[in-house]
Every structure is written in structure tokens, then in C-alpha cells.
């Protein structure tokens, strides 16, 4: 009931991680672009094919700090069955997705205090770009609820046969057609680009790539490298285009892999990819790492080893923008904060910390994968369970109806209409 919200607020407030002064407000007033890299997993970053070719040469450069970019190498996806949309949900709300069913579809009419609404009330224009029909994952409803003013879906793109594959636009034509829309937004803007090419079952049309697929005896795994490489090129193009458009130096760019692309069904081939005898449950847990890159203009980057998950991104971004979220109901903490909590709950009950991976009730040391006493995991499992339970209460009880952070202005959903301004 509504009294639960007080307990939950006390919990999230007491777990708030004070911002790091070296990062706080360093991107105040800047544009924001999220880029969902689809199923890119961290193993592909800096991976070399047996013939020596890098799969993601552009992203690999970013891991060295190129273009003022910070790379989080111990970052995990926390999605459930809502896949891409679950990742989006975490990024904008810092709440967990549900253990049963996609929250975008099941709770599209709830009250949220989401990032698009927070930015919109601060004078930001807010927009999503995605080359698929707007109803997929109930996005057209949920985006309104989250406060997005504009949704550039497939209607805005040239969805001809050569431009599309699988769910929709290929990444290169998508980026190309997005740039004019993006540069015409009123600045500052808060936006997100959802890529599609690196999606199961992967692989590219012949004319779109010269990258040689893998030879690991599993066509899904083999083709994964090809679409990851194609996406890497598309992202490089995005960076080049943003520079040309004069946007790069006043825009924070957050790029993330939304969830795994290669399930446990592909473990035989993955063992070959990683040069291991087999993929153990511990290895499989590490394969849930997805890359997180944050370009912050004029802030030196590089690779950091902080442990975190998708739920941590919103508090991180808000700190960069100089927005205090202490009074928000959120379950993540700022990845740049010295107080960042390195406990990552997953919807299947597993938990990863900076020290341990707790997988199926067994506890392993992250450093060497050695199994240790199960009781060592208990305190982390308890905290993780509490976080998930509280988040579920918020969502199932629609509890944000009863709590509004000071200064937050709820979006006027009745004023949002994605049908009016077509290209
Ligand atoms: C569909 C795209 C892919 O629009 O976001 O969704 P996924 O299957 O990865 O959840
Ligand atoms: Mn996805």
C-alpha cells in the first residue's frame, strides 16, 4: 500500500551515493545521446579473430580514452524478458524490470519520474530514434508515459529492402537518416538512438560487409562478429557526423550493449571463441557483461574497472548534468561516485559484486573463478533481494503516484502525440 513508499524512500535515500566532484555538473546543460548497441557483449571488445582482425576497432580505440570516452569493462546487463525495452526502462528510471514479462508492455500507464520528463522540465527537447514500428514493445505508449515529446519511428525512415533487415533499419542508413533530424532538434536535447543490426540471428547482407565471419562451427556465433563489426563502423560514422554537425563537443554520448546476444545454447562455440575447454556457470555469468561507454566532453577517459549495471546509469548521467537525484526513488548509484555500490542484482536471483559472482546459489571469486563458501554471498544476496523487492513494489503498486520528488514536474501525457509531425 501507499505507506510502503516511505520505507522505500528511506532505503533509496540512505543508499544515495554522493557525487564525485571531478564529474559532478561537468556536462551541465549539454545535449545527451544514448546509443543502444543491441546485443554487443563485452567479450567482443578488444577481441581479435583468429586471423588477427579486430571485431570492433573503433570501440576498441575508445577503451583507451580516445574522444574523451570512459569505458566500463565490468558492466552487466540486468534485463528480463523485455530485452531491449527492459534496458531502456532501467536507463531512464533506475528501477528494475520485472521478473515476469516486459514492464513496457505490462505497466505502460504507471506513474514514473523518468529521465526524459526530468530533462524536459529543464528546457530539453526529448526524442527517440528507432527504425522499427512504434508499437513494438508498446513503445508508443511507454515513451509518452516517460515523457518523450518526439518518437522518430520507422515512418520517418526509408524502409526500403536494401535499408532494412530483420526488425528494421540497418545501422548505417539509420545513422545517416537520423543525423538531420537530430541536428534539427532544439538544443539542449535528450535523445536516444536504438540500433538494430547486431540483433539475433546476426549476420549482414553480402553487400554490406567484407568482414569475414567466424569459423567456430555455429552460424549464429560466426555471424555475430560480422554484425558487431558493421555496427562498430556505423558508430564511428555517428561520431564523425556529430563532429561535422558541431555537436560533439557539447554532447554526452552514452553507448551500451542492451543484453546478451549469444545465449547458453551457443556455449560450445563460445568455448572455442574464448579458448576454453568449456563455459562454466561462472564463465556464463561473466558473459553477461555488456560494454558501457560514456563520452564526456573535456573529461579524460580510459578504461575503468568499477562494477555496475544498467540500473546505475541514470544516477551517473544526472550527476554529470548537475542534477541532484537524492530525493528520487532509484535503485542504482552513480558509477563515478566513491560511494557507488558495487552490488549488481539480476532478475534470476544471481548477484555480482566487485569481489564475488553469486550464480545459482554458488559463490565464486571474480579474480580466479574459484568457488568459495556459499555463506560469503549471503549479505549481498540479502541486499540484492531487498532492492528487487522494493523495485517490484514500486512498479506493481504504481507507488510513484503517491510520491513526487521535490521540484519534479510530471509530464502532460495528453499533450504528446507521435502521429502529427511525420517527415
Ligand atoms: C525491436 C528492437 C529489438 O524494436 O528493439 O528488440 P529485442 O528483441 O532486442 O528486445
Ligand atoms: Mn535488444
Image: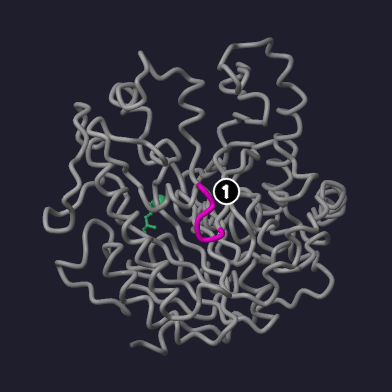
Q: What secondary structure predominates along the stretch shown in magenta?
A: helix
For image coordinates 41% across by 62% down, the residue present is 194
Depth check: 10 or 238 in front?
238
Task: Give the crowd class for mark 1: few <14, some 14-19, many >=20 residues within 10 Å.
Answer: some
Q: Position of residue 420 (x, y in %)?
A: 42, 89
Q: Considering only vertical position in the picture, is 256 above or below 235?
A: above
Q: Considering only vertical position in the picture, is 121 above or below 18?
A: below
Q: Position of residue 62 (x, y in %)?
A: 48, 52
Q: Is residue 67 magenta?
A: yes
Q: Considering only vertical position in the picture, is 174 above or below 89?
A: below
Residue position for label 1? 302
Secondary element at image label 1: strand
Depth check: 101 or 161 in front?
161
Q: Position of residue 421 (x, y in %)?
A: 41, 89
Depth check: 346 or 236 in front?
236
Q: Is residue 129 magenta?
A: no
Quarter of the image with the C terminus is bottom left
* Quadrant of residue 179 within the rendered picture: bottom left
Q: Quadrant of ligand 1?
A: bottom left
For image coordinates 33% across by 66% down, the residue present is 132
Q: Position of residue 221 (x, y in %)?
A: 27, 35
Left or right, residue 221 beside residue 135: left
- Decide if ligand 2 comes within 8 Å of the CB at mark 1: no
Q: Which residues are magenta?
A: 64-68
* Quadrant of residue 52 within the rendered picture: top left
Left or right, residue 62 beside residue 154: right
Depth check: 141 or 261 in front?
261
Amino acid at each position: 500500500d501507499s505507506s510502503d513508499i516511505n520505507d522505500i524512500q528511506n532505503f533509496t535515500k540512505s543508499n544515495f551515493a554522493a557525487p564525485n566532484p571531478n564529474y559532478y555538473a561537468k556536462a551541465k546543460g549539454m545535449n545527451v545521446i544514448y546509443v543502444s548497441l543491441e546485443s554487443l557483449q563485452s567479450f567482443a571488445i578488444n577481441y581479435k579473430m583468429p586471423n588477427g582482425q579486430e571485431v570492433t576497432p573503433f570501440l576498441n580505440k575508445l577503451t583507451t580514452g580516445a574522444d574523451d570516452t570512459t569505458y566500463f569493462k565490468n558492466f552487466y546487463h540486468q534485463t528480463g524478458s523485455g530485452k531491449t525495452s527492459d534496458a531502456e526502462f532501467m536507463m531512464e528510471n533506475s528501477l528494475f524490470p520485472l521478473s515476469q514479462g516486459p514492464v513496457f508492455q505490462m505497466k505502460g500507464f504507471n506513474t514514473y519520474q523518468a529521465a526524459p520528463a526530468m530533462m524536459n522540465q529543464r528546457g530539453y527537447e526529448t526524442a527517440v530514434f528507432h527504425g522499427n514500428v512504434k508499437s513494438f514493445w508498446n513503445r508508443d505508449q511507454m515513451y509518452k508515459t516517460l515523457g518523450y515529446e518526439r518518437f522518430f519511428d520507422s515512418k520517418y525512415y526509408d524502409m526500403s529492402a536494401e535499408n532494412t533487415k530483420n526488425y528494421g533499419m540497418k545501422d548505417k542508413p539509420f545513422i545517416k537518416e537520423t543525423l538531420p533530424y537530430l541536428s534539427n532538434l532544439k538544443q539542449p536535447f535528450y535523445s536516444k538512438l536504438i540500433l538494430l543490426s547486431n540483433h539475433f540471428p546476426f549476420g549482414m547482407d553480402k553487400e554490406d560487409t567484407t568482414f569475414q565471419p567466424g569459423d567456430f562451427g555455429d552460424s549464429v556465433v560466426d555471424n555475430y562478429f560480422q554484425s558487431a563489426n558493421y555496427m562498430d563502423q556505423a558508430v564511428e560514422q555517428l561520431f564523425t557526423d556529430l563532429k561535422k554537425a558541431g555537436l560533439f563537443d557539447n554532447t554526452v554520448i552514452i553507448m551500451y550493449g542492451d543484453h546478451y546476444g549469444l545465449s547458453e545454447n551457443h556455449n560450445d562455440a563460445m568455448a572455442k571463441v574464448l579458448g576454453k575447454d568449456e563455459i562454466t556457470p561462472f564463465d556464463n555469468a561473466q558473459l553477461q557483461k555488456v560494454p558501457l561507454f560514456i563520452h564526456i566532453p573535456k573529461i579524460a577517459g580510459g578504461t575503468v574497472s568499477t562494477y555496475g549495471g544498467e540500473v546505475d546509469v541514470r544516477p551517473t548521467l544526472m550527476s554529470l548534468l548537475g542534477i541532484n537525484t537524492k530525493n528520487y526513488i532509484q535503485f542504482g548509484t552513480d558509477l563515478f561516485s566513491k560511494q557507488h555500490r558495487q552490488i549488481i542484482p539480476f532478475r534470476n536471483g544471481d548477484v555480482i559484486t566487485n569481489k564475488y559472482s553469486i550464480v545459482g546459489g554458488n559463490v565464486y571469486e571474480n579474480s580466479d573463478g574459484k568457488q568459495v563458501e556459499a555463506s560469503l554471498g549471503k549479505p549481498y544476496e540479502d541486499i540484492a533481494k531487498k532492492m528487487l523487492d522494493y523495485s517490484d513494489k514500486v512498479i506493481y503498486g504504481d507507488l510513484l503516484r503517491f510520491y513526487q520528488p521535490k521540484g519534479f514536474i510530471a509530464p502532460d501525457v495528453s499533450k504528446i502525440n507521435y502521429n502529427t509531425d511525420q517527415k
